Image (tube, grey):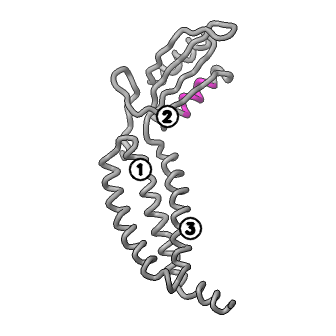
Amino acid sequence: MWESFLEILTKTSFLELFLIFFAKIIEVTISTLRLILINKGYRNYGVVLALVEIFLWVFVASSVIMGLSESPMKGVAYGLGFAAGVYLGSTLEQKIAVGKVLIQAVVPHDKGIVITDKIRALGYGATTLEAFGKDSKRMVIMVFANRRDSKNVVKEIKAIDEKAMIISSETSNLSGGYMRQIRHLIK
């Protein structure tokens, strides 16, 4: 029994298993990025990634399927590569931070004026609304920013009012108004 199990594990070379694993990571990472980019309106980039993705898939999947019966470890390498690719793709997407966000901050009125001046001085457009909280006059500040820049905007707000209530949400459509120059995906 152990001999047949050992034979299954060693039937395929480590290099071939590594290539299947690595190619699957690349393919699924590309797939994850493609889906995210298309959903955020970057269709041209998505089409290019889809072409690379499908070529990788055809060659890797056919290699695994054709040799699965004599080497089940190919399926294991394929599955592990898939999982690692999903993780790597989502991590990479967070790093490139594609898209736009609407940041809303609810702050005391007096601090709202200071925050708005600071945000505008940094080059962002800021719209304010007068509001009333439970016990005091408040200000709602709305800022549209690139996702890449959103942490900086939040940091500036928190530097002035650490208790600010901040809500960030991704936006898919933006028309009119003022927004800091949107960076292209690839410079």
Q: Secondary structure at mark 1?
A: helix
- In the image, residue 11 sits, relative to residue 101, either above or below, namely below
What residue is shown with label 3?
80
**Badge 3 amino acid:** Leu
What residue is shown with label 1?
35
Alpha carbons under labels 2 and 1: distance apart: 22 Å
Q: Percent position (x, y) of residue 119?
A: 51, 21
Q: Residue at x 39, y 46 (%)?
A: 37
Range of residues picked out in magenta:
151-158
- Give the quadrant of residue 32: bottom left
Residue 154 lies within the magenta run: yes
Q: Percent position (x, y) of residue 160?
A: 63, 20
**Badge 2 amino acid:** Asp
Q: Percent position (x, y) of residue 66?
A: 42, 81
**Badge 1 amino acid:** Leu
Asked whether 1 or 110 is in front, the reply is: 1
- Mark 2 vs mark 1: in front: 1
Asked whether the viewer can see residue 110, the reply is no
What residue is shown with label 2?
149
Disc 3: CA contacts within 10 A as few (<14), some (14-19) or many (>=20): some
- In the image, residue 164 sits, relative to residue 40, either above or below, namely above
